[in-house]
Image (cartoon, rainbow, N blue to C red):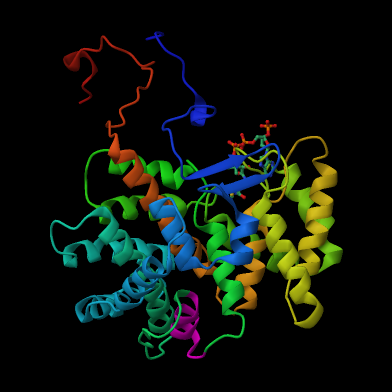
Amino acid sequence: MDVDFDVKHGLEGVAVAISSISYVDGKKGELVYRGFSIEDLIKNSNFEETAYLIWFGSLPNENELDFIVSMLSKKRELPEKIINIMRLFPKNSHPMEVLRSVVSILGMYSGENNSTLEDAINLTAKIPTVIAYWYRIKNNMPIIHPREDLKHSENFLYMMFGEISQYSELFDKTLILHAEQGMNASTFASTVTASTLTDTYSIITTAIGTLKGPLHGGANERVLKMFEEIKSVDNVESYINALIENKNKIMGFGHRIYKTYDPRAKVLKEWIKELFLKENVEYFEIALKVEEYVLKKFENRKIYPNVDFYSGILYNFFNIPKEFFTTIFAMARIIGWTAHSMEYCKNNRIFRPRSIYNGPKNFKYKEYKRS
Ligand SMILES: CC(C)(COP(=O)(O)OP(=O)(O)OC[C@H]1O[C@@H](n2cnc3c(N)ncnc32)[C@H](O)[C@@H]1OP(=O)(O)O)[C@@H](O)C(=O)NCCC(=O)NCCS
């Protein structure tokens, strides 16, 4: 066996880039974009401005903000041919499959020689439209075309449900929370793809496929499924005990970096608590009980709720079906994926790690060929 180097399982503790995009303090539970804490940004900023900040490295002035807002609103519509292709997809396709496929197809319509930034803006503008169109097509409803006069989040909820939500600002803040998070699995996957100097549509197709997995962005959908199965607060303990006995992961808990409460989960929980006082917010009481019981069971194990534990309750409140939850994550995280790809490629080197071979080396074809 080749033993010149070690295997870092899951690349734990390995740094693959130097980056000024975000800072994650896993011990203190802090997340900072370009120097600004997420708590500061959700209080004072909006998705478009935060996207500018993450892409360009500083807050925009008025003209710069106008530019990004106008670019994002003008590029929302999809080519008619793509809408027709979407109508041919099987209705039971998962929204993440649809998003991954349509982003890939959009690459054929993008024109040549665009900068990654132009493609990033184009995809950031169009991804909400893909999600909303698929929601309407899947449910045999007429699609609702985007409106240029609405903000990014307002327009998305309008295209989904045909009205301006009074809670679109809250939705917008959830996008800020999900926009960036260091070298997580999908950002790493997108950076690996970018390091081959391929196009942005390939990069984002890779990232969406990676985010879809249940250990990553796909966890939010599974968390809601868990709440649905639990049904009542009284069933929480037996349900969680069964998961632990069968050595199943509890979705929405644990994190490679956060060994304390995920700051995004903390913020989401506070918002839901406030909302719960005046609105019917399904599953919140079950979630609180799950959290309390899991923390008790995992005492001293440093396993806490992560961002996916509470986000689904909020999306469910917005009437977004659970199969669509991870697409909302993608709609925000495209900012981080593209920012990291652009940053990495400024000082690019193709990713080419090793694996240690532990198989045989001396087989002879004629001896092993079976008749
Ligand atoms: C996020 C996650 C993939 C991180 O993985 P990781 O850093 O490789 O951590 P590991 O899976 O090696 O977990 C370390 C230990 O904690 C346990 N653990 C971690 N998360 C757990 C969870 N959600 N439920 C039960 N046990 C968990 C593991 O079983 C392991 O125990 P062991 O040391 O006895 O084998 C993992 O915590 C997980 O699968 N969580 C559930 C899915 C999820 O919510 N993903 C969204 C992440 S934002």
Q: Nearer the viewer, residue 199 or 151?
A: 151
- Residue at position x 37%, y 22% in the image: 355
Residue 117, located in which quarter of the rendered image? Answer: bottom left
Q: Tell me the chief SS of the magenta region.
A: helix
Task: Judge from the rendering whether residue 296 lies leftward or rightward of residue 336; answer left or right.
Answer: right
Residue 91 x/y as whole percent: 38, 76
Residue 114 x/y as whole percent: 18, 58
Residue 104 x/y as whole percent: 26, 60
- Residue at position x 75%, y 82% in the image: 279
Q: Nearer the viewer, residue 63 or 110?
A: 63
Residue 368 falls inside the magenta stretch: no
Task: Judge from the rendering whether residue 190 lies leftward or rightward of residue 281; answer left or right.
Answer: left
The residues colored magenta run: 153-163
Residue 54 x/y as whole percent: 44, 53
- Residue at position x 61%, y 63% in the image: 42
Task: Judge from the rendering whether residue 19 lies leftward or rightward of residue 245; answer left or right.
Answer: left
Q: Nearer the viewer, residue 268 or 290?
A: 268
Is residue 66 among what the camera can see? Answer: yes
Q: Is residue 319 above or below residue 62?
A: below
Residue 141, located in which quarter of the rendered image? Answer: bottom left
- Residue at position x 65%, y 45% in the image: 30
Is residue 252 among what the camera can see? Answer: no
How many labels sit on residues?
Answer: 0
Task: Judge from the rendering whether residue 280 lies leftward or rightward of residue 147; answer left or right.
Answer: right
Tell which quarter ligand 1 is in: top right
**Quadrant that contains the C terminus:** top left
**Quadrant that contains the N terminus:** top left
Q: Is residue 345 above or below residue 262?
A: above
